[in-house]
Image: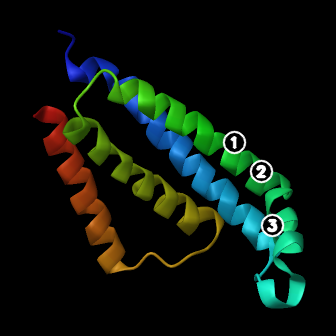
Amino acid sequence: MTSPIAFLPLILFTVLTNAAAQIMLKKGMMGVGALDIGADGIVSTVFRVVFNPFVFFGLSTFVISMASHLIVLSKVQLSYAYPFLSLAYVVVAAYSYFFFAEDVGLARLAGIGLIVAGTILIAQS
């Protein structure tokens, strides 16, 4: 049987595409603005959101991420693979800090440290 660590590159690809999808969705929604379904109507709102290029490509990237995750799940245990997805939060938080000027305070940094430490422990199990 192949070691789960052999699938680490594909797992990390899944993590990075998941994070990229989140970042594109945020960028797209910044362009769309606040949603008011009552005022705009649901059909108009859905079209405005889905056909925003960043939202569209973000959703497409999620499909790629899920496809790679399905491949991973066919090869390794869920309890090994799934916790790695939490690393997407680390990537998104760093990107958000540097490019969206979002506040990442001490509590978030501590949480990020715990996520990284926990993922390292899981990877070694």
> Would you say 96 lies left or right of 120 here?
right
Labels 2, 3: front one: 3
Indicate the secondary structure of the residue bearing disc 3.
helix
Q: Residues within 10 Å of mark 3 (few under 14, many from 20)?
A: some
Residue underneath mark 3: 46
Query: Which quadrant is home to the C terminus?
Result: top left
The answer to which image quadrant residue 55 occupies is bottom right
Please name the residue shown 66% across and 65% down the image: 26
- In the picture, the disc for residue 74 is none
Check the image and report above or below for 48 versus 4.
below
Instruction: Using the rendered image of the protein, determine whether residue 36 is visible from the camera's viewpoint.
Output: no
Which residue is found at the position 22% from the left and 37% from the top? 80
How many angstroms separate mark 1 from mark 3 (CA)? 16 Å
- Residue placed farthest to the bottom in the image? 39
Residue 56's disc number: 2
For this view, does 88 lie left or right of residue 116? Answer: right
- How packed mark 1 is, by other alpha carbons closer than 10 Å (few <14, some 14-19, many 20 or more), is some
Gap in angstroms between the C-alphas marked 1 and 2 = 6 Å
Residue at horizontal 33 percent and vertical 69 percent from the top: 109
Instruction: Check disc 1 and give the amino acid type.
Output: Ser
Depth order, front residue of 113/58: 58
Q: Position of residue 19 (x, y in %)?
A: 53, 50
- Amino acid type of the residue tagged 3 in the rendering: Val
Judged by depth in the image, the label closer to the viewer, 1 or 3, is 3
**Mark 2 packing: few (<14 Cα in 10 Å), some, or many (20+)?**
some
